[in-house]
Image (cartoon, rainbow, N blue to C red):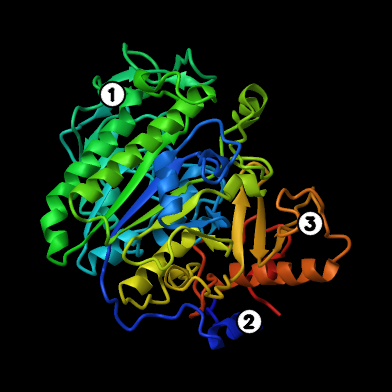
Amino acid sequence: MKKIRRIVPTWLLCSMVAGWGIQSAAAETKPNIIVIYTDDQGYGDVSALNPEAKFQTPNLDRLVKEGIAFTNGHSADSVCSPSRYSLLTGRYPWRTNRKTGVLGAEAKCMIADGRMTLASLLRDQGYHTGMVGKWHLGMDFPGKKGKRDWSKPTKDMPLDKGFDYFYGIPASLNFGVLAWFEGRHATVPPTVFTSKKKNKRHSDYRIMPPYRERGGMEIAPDFIDNQCLTRFTDKSIEWMKSKTADAKKGKPFFLYLPYTSPHYPVCPLPKFHGQGKAGAYGEFMIETDHHIGRILDFLKSSGLEDDTMIVFSSDNGPERSWPARIEDFDHDSRGGYREGKRSVYEGGHRVPFLVRWPKGIMEPGRSSDKLVGQVDLLATFAELTGVTLPDTAGEDSQSFAVILKDPAANHKRLPLINRGEGEDRYSITEGKWKLVLPTKKEKAELYDLQADPAEKTNLAASDPGKVAALQKKITEIVVNGRTSPGATQPNDTGYWKQLSWMTEADFKNEK
């Protein structure tokens, strides 16, 4: 086995000397934490971030007005499963065995046993930990399709990754298995089968009765797609109510609430039909905002509002229906950024990124253009709770807690890496500069995001020195198995073909 060597590049050493990621000696308080994660919501789908939006999101706007809007916040990938992996682990998804694509409902969980997650970090600090919503990181169901024994427990799922409570669905609604799972069992087993049905109100599909003994999706007889948002919000409030007394006595809770909207199927409840001016998609976002308002109302009525941190974001940019919304309704879900879901360009991974914490944020109602990633939540929560992360956790996570406490903080994020599923390309962003890495077919692209946020002018030919410098940095980050300071860590695999700008010898760090 090749010996792993500790390599600290000069640019990273400088950050260490400068005191990057200052760790609190001890947290004054440990806030309740709620992470709300939408699915395929673009930057332009929050009305406070998009003056030209054709629907209003008053509750999301509250998070902006009463917290911090990180206007340069990013998911780690441009599709679902990998972004969720990074959100929960603080590690880039391409370091795992899965280099491309998303998981089905049934798969080996992308999070390895023993890897620290947001849930396990906070559980070990005395938190109650609950998850309600869409998992999409793989589960191990009992038996094989058509020969299930639903009396047996589901394994390799949220309860094995640091969560004490789970209610939700295994994956996106276009994948079987579909049922309302609570704990390790489906409340009603998915014993019938179905296929997608035509959606009369949007250019996608529906998952709704009647269900017949045909089709490729295993489904529970009581499952209906448009119940997801209501059920998830109801269960979230129910679970938080059960933890309120403990929270007031010093034992806080952590809730991870990944909604299914506005991912297909776009299926707003009838009470929201006709609202907004962006068709069914706008109605679906209005419904989503309504349920976020229910969470806010609960926190206020329960007396938990002041010391509860809410982090809101989306797993990637908007689905491919975004051009039709521009044409039909003049609504740009991308918020003016280039492309959308699956893209390496900004519209694929620059997403709404909002933080509200009345007791913990100085000068709320401000925005920050500092570069941050969802991968940074692990280090941020660790700092806020007084934890020093081990070298084997949160390898790509950098705390942004200082921004919450100090409006004038000069937070400088280490280079942030993103990946585009559609182009199968990587990018690295440092400060205002973004390099889209070359492939065997495409040349490198360099953008000044400060002057050109829409990525219209490729500067690679005019600044080869910057291209070379950023390419060197991403190579070091890949090879070292981490972005943050610490001992070099292994990736889960050897060299993979998408690292087309570097050689296998580079990967092995051979001189």
Q: Amino acid at mark 3?
A: Ala
Q: Say which residue label 3 marks.
A: 444
Question: In which quarter of the view is residue 148 placed?
Answer: top left
Q: Say which residue label 1 marks.
A: 223
In terms of depth relative to the viewer, which is nearer, 295 or 141? 295
Q: Say which residue label 2 marks.
A: 9
Q: Position of residue 298 (x, y in %)?
A: 23, 45
Element type at mark 1? loop
Q: Position of residue 7 (x, y in %)?
A: 58, 82
Q: CA distance from mark 2 to mark 3?
A: 23 Å
Q: Is residue 441 above or below residue 484?
A: above
Element type at mark 2? loop
Closer to the chain start, of discs 3 and 1, is 1
In terms of depth relative to the viewer, which is nearer, 40 or 369? 369
Label pair 2/1, CB-CB below 8 angstroms: no
At x 69% / y 70%, what residue is drawn?
505
In terms of depth relative to the viewer, which is nearer, 367 or 310? 367
Question: In which quarter of the view is residue 15 placed?
Answer: bottom right
Q: Position of residue 384 (x, y in %)?
A: 34, 71
